[in-house]
DNA sequence: TATTGTTATACTCTATAACTATA
DNA sequence: TATAGTTATAGAGTATAACAATA
C-alpha cells in the first residue's frame, strides 16, 4: 500500500509571490514569536506599545494612545484596566472628562524588562534579512501604512 | 478656555522605527483594505487563498491546504463548509478517510472575479512602495517567515 | 502509529453602536 | 458640536484537546 500523503509538501503554491500574502505571513510569524517571548514578563504586544507611549508622553490620554496605535477607544478600556490592575499605570484626572496616564514605579521596571525582549527581538528580525535587502525593509513597510 | 486636545497628533512615538511594529501595522492596514474590497465578491482573504490552492492542486485534501496556509485542521472545517455551502467547492472521497477538494463551475467563476481584485490590489501595493525599495520588499518578507 | 476529518471550546483582536458627561 | 470614557456585543482569527475511523 502506498503510504504517501496526498500533496505532502509538493503542492503548487503561487501565493508566496504575492507581496500582500508574504506580508501577512511574515507579520503573523513574527507576532507569534514576539508574543511567545513576552509571556516571560506577562505582557502582550499591545501592552508594551501602550507602556512605551505612556513613558514617552507623560499624562497622555487613553484616546490619544488609541489614535496613535490605531486601537479603538472602546478597545482601550479593558487593555488599560488590566495594566492598572497589574499596578503598571496610574490615572490622574486632567479635567472633568479626561484622565492622564503615567507609569508607576512597577510599570517603569516592567517596561525595562519588556524593552530588553523587544529590542533583542527586533535586532534578530533584521539579522534574518539578507544584508542587501535590510536597509529597504523599514522604508518599504512605512510606505504601506503611513 | 483652551480647546486643544491632549496630545492631538504631536505625541512622541518611537514605535514606527521598529521593523516588527511597522510590519504589523502594514499587514493590518493592507489586510483591512483587501478584506474590504473582497466583500464585493462575498469572500474572505482565507477563502481566496484556499480557492487558489484548490484550483492549482486538483483533489487536494483539507489537511494539505491547511499545512500550506498555516491554518489548523480544526479551523479548516468551518471554512470549507462555507465554501461548500456556497457551491464553490466539491468534495469527492479519495479513500476511506480523505476527501479531495475541487472547484465547481461556480467556484472557478468566483475565483476569476476574486483574482481580478487581488491582483489589482497587489499591483497597487507595490506601486505605493518607492521604486528604489520595491524589488527588496518580497525577498525581505520571505526571509522573515520561510 | 501516524494521519484525516471532526467537534467543542476558548482566547485574542477588532469593529460598531449607543450612552453619559464634559470641552 | 465634538471629544472622552465607557458598556455591550458581535465577528473574525487562532489555538488546544479530544475523538473516531482509516492509512
Image (cartoon, coloured by chain):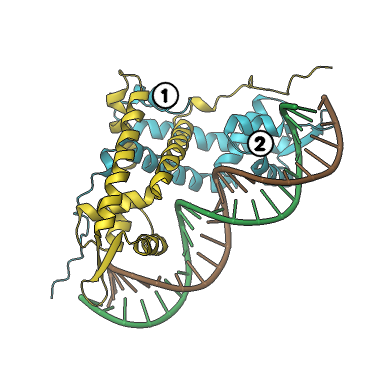
Chain colours: A yellow, B cyan, C green, D brown
Residue B101 falls in image quadrant = top right
Residue A55 drawn above or below residue A25: below
Q: CA distance from mark 2 to mark 1?
A: 34 Å
The chain carrying label 2 is B
**Residue A71 relative to residue B101: left or right:** left
Residue B59 showing in the rendered view:
no
Number of residues whose C-alpha sits closer than 10 Å to that of mark 1, classed few (under 14), some (14–19) or many (20 or more): some
Numbered circle sitting on residue B109: 2
- In front of the other: B113 or B30: B30
Helix, strand or loop at disc 2? helix
**Residue B11 relative to residue D1: left or right:** left
Q: Position of residue A112 (x, y in %)?
A: 27, 46
Residue A35 falls in image quadrant = top left
2 vs 1, front mark: 1
Q: Look at the image and tell me in which quarter the N terminus of chain B lies.
A: bottom left
Q: Residue at x 40, y 49 (%)?
A: A44
Residues marked 2 and 1, same chain: yes
Q: Position of residue C16 (x, y in %)?
A: 47, 63
Q: Residue at x 36, y 60 (%)?
A: A83
Residue A102 showing in the rendered view:
yes
Residue A140 drawn above or below residue B25: above
Q: Position of residue A32 (x, y in %)?
A: 46, 39
Helix, strand or loop at disc 1? helix
- Marks 2 and 1, the one that precedes in the sequence: 2
Q: Position of residue C5 (x, y in %)?
A: 76, 39
How many numbered discs, if any? Answer: 2
The chain carrying label 1 is B
Numbered circle sitting on residue B63: none
Numbered circle sitting on residue B143: 1
Number of residues whose C-alpha sits closer than 10 Å to that of mark 2, classed few (under 14), some (14–19) or many (20 or more): few
Pick out the residue farthest to the left. Answer: B1
- In front of the other: A9 or C12: C12
Amino acid at each position: 500500500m502506498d503510504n504517501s500523503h496526498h500533496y505532502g509538501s509538493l503542492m503548487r503554491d503561487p501565493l508566496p509571490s504575492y507581496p500582500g500574502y508574504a506580508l501577512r505571513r511574515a507579520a503573523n510569524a513574527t507576532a507569534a514569536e514576539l508574543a511567545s517571548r513576552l509571556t516571560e514578563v506577562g505582557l502582550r504586544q499591545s501592552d508594551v506599545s501602550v507602556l512605551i507611549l505612556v513613558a514617552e508622553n507623560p499624562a497622555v490620554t487613553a484616546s490619544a494612545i488609541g489614535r496613535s496605535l490605531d486601537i479603538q477607544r472602546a478597545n482601550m478600556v479593558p487593555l488599560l484596566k488590566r495594566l492598572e490592575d497589574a499596578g503598571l499605570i496610574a490615572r490622574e484626572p486632567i479635567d472633568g472628562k479626561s484622565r492622564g496616564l503615567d507609569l508607576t514605579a512597577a510599570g517603569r521596571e516592567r517596561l525595562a524588562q519588556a524593552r530588553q525582549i523587544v529590542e533583542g527581538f527586533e535586532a534578530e528580525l533584521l539579522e534574518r534579512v539578507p544584508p542587501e535587502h535590510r536597509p529597504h525593509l523599514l522604508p518599504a513597510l512605512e510606505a504601506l501604512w503611513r
